[in-house]
Amino acid sequence: MRILVWHVHGSWMTSFVQGPDEYVIPVDDARSPDGRGRARTWDWPRSAREVPVAALRDEELDVAVLQRPVELDLVERWTGRRPGTDLPAVYVEHNTPPGPAAASRHPLADRSDVPIAHVSDFNALMWDNGRAPTTVVDHGIPDTGYRYTGERARIAAVVNEPVRRWRVAGTDVLLDVASRVPVEVYGMGVDALREHRPELGGHLHDLPQHELHTALPQARAYLHPYRWTSLGLSLIEAMTLGLPVLAVATTAAPYAVPPEAGVVSARPDRLVEAARRWLHDPQDALEHGRAAREHALRVFGLDRFLSDWQSVLKEVTR
């Protein structure tokens, strides 16, 4: 199939373009959000090719995979075909409802011609999907290999823009934990945490993904402080690398982290208690990390993800 798809979420897209199809990715001169083209920091196959916006009308497309409401209009303007009518389409919902959670109506809730593919059962439950057909395709990521050493007696977290996304990202939980056990934080904009917790200064890092995958598993365990998110891919990546997990018990985290892989709790005190235990007992951390990796490979493996997407795309284009 020839799939029209935008480069919106780099990590998700890196997995998606590993499939057997041809991926047509819009690009413009400014590489704007509507035309980013191929990723520059991830290794994508040649089957993921850039096509200038002005040339999209000449492309033979089989299906559109949408990820933002604006793309419904972009498809029609740039290809001359209406998604769901002239061109089969499916909409990937990456996000939890913006709120109020129990009453948020999905932008496609009044349409029946474009199904919604949620990235977690929690998402599908919380959104009011109206009459739109819905399905769930859990995340899947490439296996980066078992890299855990746990040599640093610190707890690692990955949070992008932790100050701007304060309560959503659970930054308050992160800083609470950091006040009681050694913590290191990775992600975009983490330097802004210095003014809130100066002692973290030497343990704030913004690294490219390949460097992150080397640095992260040297920490003793991984902390997932998010209060409101679909399911951060960094959590699955950490588990795949072999880190044991401490996670706030919200959204899809209880499903993603079984008891043998770590501790999931809505009480930060319990996360701190487990962190202290692992800091003093590296062998216990190692065993939980191995279980985390086994679970991640089984539930969030790339082969399962691509197989599920093939089923969805074949159904949409049938």
Image (spheres, grey):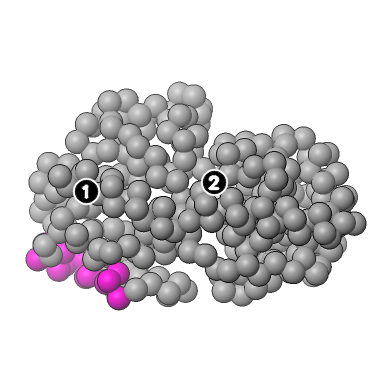
How far apart are the alpha carbons under marks 1 and 2?
26 Å
Image quarter of the C terminus: top left
Residue 158 in view here: no
Q: Quick check: 215 above or below 225? A: below
Dots 1, 2 in contact, CB < 8 A: no
Start-end of magenta stretch = 46-58
Relative to 277, 77 lies left or right: left
Q: Which residue is mark 2?
A: 231
Q: Position of residue 2 (x, y in %)?
A: 19, 61
Residue 128 in view here: yes
Q: Residue at x 56, y 53 (%)?
A: 296
Q: Position of residue 84 (x, y in %)?
A: 17, 42
Relative to 264, 273 lies left or right: right
Q: Residue at x 28, y 47 (%)?
A: 311
Q: Is residue 55 magenta?
A: yes
Query: Which numbered disc flags the more N-terminal residue, 1 or 2?
Result: 2
Q: Position of residue 129 (x, y in %)?
A: 35, 29
Image quarter of the N terminus: bottom left
Determine the image quadrant of residue 252: top right
80 or 280, which is in the foreground?
280
Q: Position of residue 185 (x, y in %)?
A: 71, 61
143 or 128, which is in the foreground?
143
- Which kind of residue does numbered mark 1 sit on? Lys
Q: Which residue is mark 1?
A: 314
- Which kind of residue does numbered mark 2 sit on? Leu
